[in-house]
Image: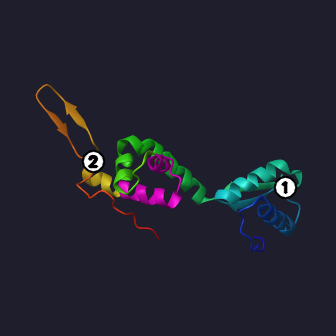
Amino acid sequence: MAEPVILNPNSYANVDTVLRHVKMQITGNRHWTIVGSDGNPYVLGQRLRDEKDDLKHLLLMPGPDHFELNMVKALFKLLWPVGLKALGKLVGYKTEKALEYCHKAGGHHKAWTCYSYFSNLWPSFGCKTSMNSKSQQHTYPLFPPIKPGLKMHQT
């Protein structure tokens, strides 16, 4: 475990500084070293690693947050037509542009909160389905009657 570097890894220069610091901490005859990171530092580090030969021996491994972020985005794509669009409208995404932002799960914390609402509401109220027949049509509501404009709890 390397000594920490107190830098915000939000730029190529800072990530480069951190990776070079890690490289200086390596002892022994290693062919590669695993470096864990998430989000923007992971993306910037991968690009730097691909560009600079002296960083090729560093293997960047995404952490659990990276997997969680991609999982939420995939779930939003899968569940959008099923009910997340309706929930997005209920929690305040009114315009088409706002709904598009919600659909792309752009704000990870908001998307995770929205998905949590959805997963908690889904078992209670079921999915919206229609049974078409000549004599009757049944519609099972996706969500209970809630006032539009419900605000999400933000921490």
In the image, residue 138 lies at what x, y percent? Answer: 17, 37
Task: Give residue 59's quadrant in the image.
Answer: bottom right
Q: Earlier in the sequence, mark 2 or mark 1?
A: 1
- Disc 2 residue type (three-letter): Leu
Farthest residue toward the top? 134
Return the mark for residue 40: none
The 10 Å Cα crowd at callout 2, few under 14, some 14 to 19, many 20 or more, is: some
Q: Can you say whether 78 is above or below 147 in the image?
A: above
Residue at x 86%, y 51% (from the top left corner)? 52
Q: Can you say whether 77 is above or below 52 in the image?
A: above
In the image, residue 5 lies at what x, y percent? Answer: 77, 73
Q: Is residue 106 left or right of residue 93?
A: right
The residue pinned by badge 1 equals 55
Residue at x 58%, y 59% (from the top left corner)? 65
Q: Identify the magenta region.
A: 97-118
Task: Quadrant for the N terminus, please.
Answer: bottom right
- Disc 1 residue type (three-letter): Leu
Q: Nearer the viewer, residue 149 or 108?
A: 149
Return the mark for residue 142: 2
Element under disc 2: loop
Farthest residue toward the front? 95
- Residues marked 2 and 1 touching at CB (< 8 Å): no
Residue at x 35%, y 46% (from the top left corner)? 83
Element under disc 1: helix
Q: Is residue 141 left or right of residue 60?
A: left
